[in-house]
Amino acid sequence: MLRIVNTKLGKIEGLPAADPRITSFKGIPFAKPPVGDLRFHAPVPAEKWEGTLKAYNFAPISVQPTPYYDPNDLYCREWSVDKDIPMSEDCLYLNVWTPANAADEKFPVYVWIYGGGFQTGFTAEMEFDGERIARRGIVVVTLAYRLNIFGFMCHPEITKENPSAPANFGLLDQRMAMQWVKDNIAAFGGDPENITLGGQSAGGGSVLNQILYGHKDLFKRAVCHSGMFQMPGNNIMTPRPLKEAEKFGEEFFAFAGVKTLAEIRKLSTEQLRQKWEEYGGFHKSVKIWIPVKDDKFVKTEFFDAIKNNSAQLVPMMLGFTTDEFTFKPQDSDTPVNAVKAGINLYKQLTDQIPSHPKNYCYQFDVEIPGWDNPGKFHSVDLWFWFETLAKCWRPFTGGYYDVARHMCNYLCNFVKCGDPNGKDCDDTPMEQWKSYSGEDDIITFKLAEAK
């Protein structure tokens, strides 16, 4: 097995995963720590190191509200299990799972961007374990990026300091990680010419932003899970103008009791995080510290680019969970109407590109078990795409595992060649998934599909 790799920055040693045929490398730096004068600044590439980097553990997570277990909160009890998880501004690291036995192998590569409203999220979340995908002959990379005020702060002084990259530091972090993958993934047995970029929710929105900026050979296809949903007064997928974002920055400077960029950079991480929490925390931040139309990295909104035919598109897999739209439409009184509104939202995108030969659309409609009767809520499909149901507390039984296996198979086939279709593990063909040309071409994942 390939336990030690030699990248352009130095040697890295990994560990066997639960399946010893897979090697995991965790906590690999792709950028300098964004601290001191690099706080609120575009990322700077990591430097070479001496000796061998022991990539045994996940790095500290990006600064965010402390993940904790709250039995009354659906998302906390689903994923937040460690209230003491380390977090730091020094967070720009990535992880790799590889099935390779030697560096000269060329496995397809899947690069993953987590979601969380651009405010929360981290690569160490249980559902993002890359081992099951790696077993199918894919090198998996999960990357971290700066969040909330640390990743999306804007201010006139920041713009003046670096007018070529005045905002969207979290998106720039992602871009630097993607470049690192392009430059180094061959050392892990990955094919730098066969990279798929994927993400969910804000991660899916990030994928769309990366497509708009231009793939420039960094990836050749994309996966967007739940990346285009909208909520009234809280549309994180539509970038706000830079000048508007700068006004929020000026307001926050005054709230924090600082006058200059130098002063706010002198605040400790915890001081800045506390001020951010006092200012409004997640619920206000998700409306403020989000991607910005800076005319540098983000120049337009994805739907506008599609309508204007200005986007350089790549083959895509995209879709949503049935119940994630129950909070979306202002004019919806029932979940049924909300679902229809959600489907219409996706049709607005897909109908603009029906002639594209490689777009595959889905709806996740699996009723999720548990005492809380959660339905098919936003993000729950991640357990299925990564086939990590066994890590979840919910009472999943055989039929759910069948659906997860099929979904993971579809995903991996798409990553390999741009077409999700293929055979199941028993060599029987899976249900055909047609490329999108109309509403009937949306595949629906249901528990009933289990054989």
Image: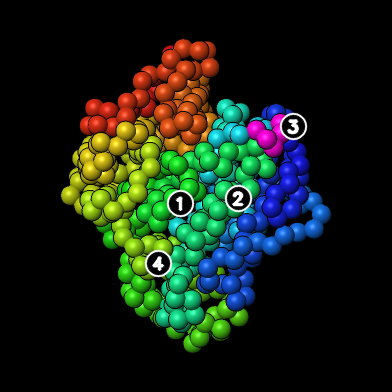
Q: Give the range drawn in magenta.
A: 101-105
Label 4: which secondary element: loop
Q: Where is residue 8 in the image (x, y as percent from the top left)?
A: 69, 52
The quarter of the rendered structure image containing the C terminus is top left
Residue at 59% x, 33% y is 107
Q: How far apart are marks 2 and 1 (CA)?
A: 13 Å
- According to the picture, the residue beneath numbered tag 2 turns out to be 183
Question: Is residue 85 shown left or right of residue 381?
Answer: right
Label 1: which secondary element: loop
Q: Where is residue 272 in the image (x, y as percent from the top left)?
A: 55, 73
Q: Is residue 122 within the magenta segment?
A: no
Residue 84 appears in view: no
Nearer mark to the viewer, of 4 and 2: 2
Q: Is residue 103 within the magenta segment?
A: yes
Q: Which residue is nearer to you in this view: 278 or 61?
A: 61
Q: In this view, does 448 lie above or below 364?
A: above
The amino acid marked with disc number 4 is Lys
Q: Which mark is residue 1?
A: 3
Q: Residue 296 carries which label?
A: 4
Crowdedness near tag 2: few (<14), some (14–19) or many (≥20) residues, C-alpha within 10 Å: some
